[in-house]
């Protein structure tokens, strides 16, 4: 596991007795944060509106939902799988939470319990795609594409033609009330990132997710039953999407079927830009968090310098292809087969 | 990917003498599904099995057949093309914008342009070794962005209806021209594949890319060609959509992605590549269209349509997947 980049870092630092488990700063790890600083600097020079404190707050607030989605997808990508189910799961949980807290459609007023149910619904849908992957052996991009459609269908059923508007003060407050200059949503996202980091570093689930991405055969041959961990990772990802759906509902004060439209792709972009390899085994929540900020700064900055917001998706598309190409090119020979 | 010989399930490696009943059933799955669906719908509503409603159904299915047929080639190579629907939407906008200037040759220009865009994706996939679903997912959002920008995020009206009039005609007064074009396309591509080494190359690429490469098949060029045809088909489907809606719109075809993928996998083309054909996708597209048309007839709310697509995709892939090849499912 020794890379040349690590040797560079090692020449600076006095070597501790045992080999470092790649915690040191390698060039590919430092790239995304440097890019973030550079892009931030460029936009700050180009646009006077961009370099205001309130705009920085805006960027952080705008990154909240994407950060939560990316937390979920990062674990899936770490395993080398892919997850396209965010739009469906977010849509389902958005409508579910809007119908469960105080709203204009029914007399429910479950408050936090409603939020919990919506997150559980997301987890259940995520679990379903995990099970389809493990039991039916269907590749993850197909199962999650299917589950996304199922989620959208469930959302449409609950939507039933009348938009549920949220009147619950707590949920509405999340998007409006501020703490230390940032909306409560943003702090929830920060908490999610922290939870993600803790799970990744200190739980068996997080470490096995890495190992599955790195070398699943080896893990299987060492007697680890991989399947339950895969299902668990997809379930956890689903829970994160469910929470993201709740956050969107809080922002819009209404449940929308399209609450999660485009978030799957944005999250993959953020994770990939942050340095997660699509082949699995590399990356992490903190990488992805940097990626989320990169994507959000880029989106915000481009609008500030006068680029049509419609280009957003196009820019993300270019970035993701470029980032994946940059990550894969050095190993061209090794994975000669690309599907 | 180095084949991990350690984990290969040895007992299954024996070459089966003749297909089992189950295999035979899955081979005819799309046709069986089609017949069963037709029968069920006729029982639910005896008025369904009339000439006019069947004509309407096949007419609706034409763009879907074309989209699915093109993407089938990519799937046969072992990849996936998720950009077809977005490219088709973009092409409808192009068509509406170009028609005043180009007139009669707009259709050809559109198909050439989308073919070139498809080829570009293929080149990116082959040259940079980026997984096909990432290239096409990126392509999907780029095409949507371009379509939104050049159309100002709204529908563009097509005033000159003569250019697409031929697609709205009926052959022999019964069969819609659009469907005939779709059939001719499927037949022509299948024939070209059969008469040239292309068929073997595509199959070899799908079954085992490294083996195909070692055997001297032009794997890279075959893949680029598959993406090109897929793009061109998206263009043709766009012309069909415009002929029906008399406008181009940046989101017109976006909801065709799931049905197209469903059509391919319901047809029995293995998502792992190699096994399948365009005819299967034709049958699959008809099944999907019948489901779409038929759900309201039997009184199921259309919200279930999405759930059904999801379930169908997962179930069909699970049935057709070539498990001997993929030891580790990501």
Image (cartoon, helix red, strand yellow):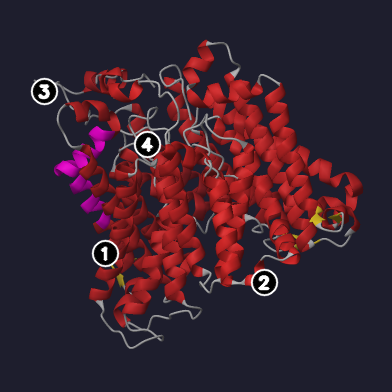
Magenta stretch, overall SS: helix
Mark 3, residue position: A16
Q: CA distance from mark 2 to mark 4?
A: 58 Å
Residue hosting label 4: A275
Q: Are marks 3 and 4 in contact (CB under 8 Å)?
A: no
The answer to whether dots 3 and 1 both sit on one chain is yes
| Mark 3 or mark 1, earlier in chain | 3
Q: Which residue does the image show at 38% across and 42% down from the upper left?
A: A138
Give the CA separation, mark 2 to mark 3: 82 Å
Horizontal side of residue A275 vs B47, given as left or right: left
- The answer to whether marks 2 and 1 mark residues whose Cβ atoms lie closer than 8 Å is no
Q: Nearer the viewer, residue A59 or B146?
A: B146
Q: Which residues are magenta?
A: A192-212
Secondary structure of residue under mark 4? loop
**Residue farthest left in this picture:** A17
Q: Quadrant of residue B154?
A: bottom right
Residue at mark 1: A120
């Amino acid at each position: 596991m020794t890379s040349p980049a690590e040797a560079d870092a090692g020449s600076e630092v006095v070597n501790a007795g045992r080999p470092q488990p790649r915690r040191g700063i390698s060039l590919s790890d430092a790239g995304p944060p440097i890019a973030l600083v550079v892009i931030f600097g460029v936009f700050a020079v180009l646009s006077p509106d961009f370099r205001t404190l309130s705009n920085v707050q805006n960027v952080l607030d705008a990154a909240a939902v994407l950060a939560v989605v990316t937390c979920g997808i990062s674990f899936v990508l770490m395993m080398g799988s892919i997850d396209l189910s965010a739009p469906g799961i977010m849509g389902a949980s958005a409508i579910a939470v809007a119908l469960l807290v105080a709203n204009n459609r029914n007399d429910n007023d479950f408050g936090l319990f409603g939020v919990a149910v919506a997150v559980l619904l997301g987890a259940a849908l995520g679990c379903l795609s995990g099970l389809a992957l493990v039991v039916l052996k269907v590749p993850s991009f197909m199962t999650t594409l299917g589950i996304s459609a199922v989620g959208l269908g469930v959302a449409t059923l609950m939507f039933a033609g009348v938009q549920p508007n949220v009147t619950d003060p707590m949920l509405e407050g999340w998007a409006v009330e501020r703490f230390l200059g940032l909306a409560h949503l943003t702090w929830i996202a920060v908490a999610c990132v922290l939870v993600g980091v803790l799970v990744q570093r200190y739980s068996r689930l997080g470490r096995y997710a890495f190992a599955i991405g790195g070398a699943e055969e080896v893990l299987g041959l060492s007697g680890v039953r991989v399947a339950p961990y895969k299902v668990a990772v997809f379930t956890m990802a689903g829970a994160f999407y469910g929470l993201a759906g709740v956050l969107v509902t809080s922002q819009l004060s209404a449940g929308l079927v399209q609450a999660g439209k485009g978030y799957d792709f944005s999250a993959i972009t953020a994770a990939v830009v942050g340095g997660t390899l699509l082949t699995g085994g590399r990356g992490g929540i903190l990488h992805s968090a940097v990626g989320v900020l990169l994507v959000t700064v880029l989106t915000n900055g481009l609008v500030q310098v006068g680029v049509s917001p419609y280009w957003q998706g196009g820019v993300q598309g270019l970035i993701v292809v470029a980032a994946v190409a940059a990550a894969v090119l050095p190993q061209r020979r090794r994975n000669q087969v690309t599907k | 990917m180095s084949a991990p010989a350690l984990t290969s399930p040895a007992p299954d490696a024996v070459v089966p003498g003749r297909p089992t009943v189950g295999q035979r059933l899955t081979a005819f799955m799309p046709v069986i599904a089609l017949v069963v669906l037709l029968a069920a719908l006729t029982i639910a509503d005896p008025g369904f099995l009339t000439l006019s409603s069947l004509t309407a159904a096949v007419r609706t299915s034409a763009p879907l057949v074309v989209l699915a047929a093109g993407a089938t080639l990519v799937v046969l190579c072992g990849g996936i093309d998720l950009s077809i629907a977005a490219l088709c939407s973009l092409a409808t906008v192009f068509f509406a914008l170009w028609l005043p200037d180009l007139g009669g040759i707009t259709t050809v220009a559109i198909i050439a342009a989308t073919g070139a865009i498809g080829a570009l994706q293929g080149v990116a996939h082959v040259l940079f070794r980026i997984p096909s679903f990432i290239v096409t997912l990126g392509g999907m959002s780029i095409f949507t962005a371009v379509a939104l920008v050049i159309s100002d995020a709204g529908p563009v009206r097509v005033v000159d209806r003569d250019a697409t009039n031929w697609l709205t005609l009926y052959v022999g007064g019964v069969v819609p021209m659009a469907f005939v074009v779709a059939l001719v396309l499927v037949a022509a591509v299948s024939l070209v594949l059969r008469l040239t080494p292309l068929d073997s190359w595509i199959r070899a690429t799908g079954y085992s890319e490294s083996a195909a490469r070692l055997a001297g098949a032009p794997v890279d060029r075959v893949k680029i060609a598959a993406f090109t045809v897929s793009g061109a088909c998206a263009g043709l489907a766009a012309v069909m959509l415009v002929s029906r809606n008399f406008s181009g719109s940046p989101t017109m075809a976006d909801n065709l992605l799931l049905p197209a993928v469903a059509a391919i996998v319901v047809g029995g083309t293995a998502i792992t590549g190699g096994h399948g054909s365009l005819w299967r996708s034709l049958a699959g597209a008809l099944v999907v269209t019948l489901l779409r048309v038929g759900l309201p007839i039997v009184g199921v709310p259309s919200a279930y349509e999405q759930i059904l697509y999801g379930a169908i995709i997962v179930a069909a892939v699970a049935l057709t997947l070539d498990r001997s090849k993929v030891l580790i499912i990501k």
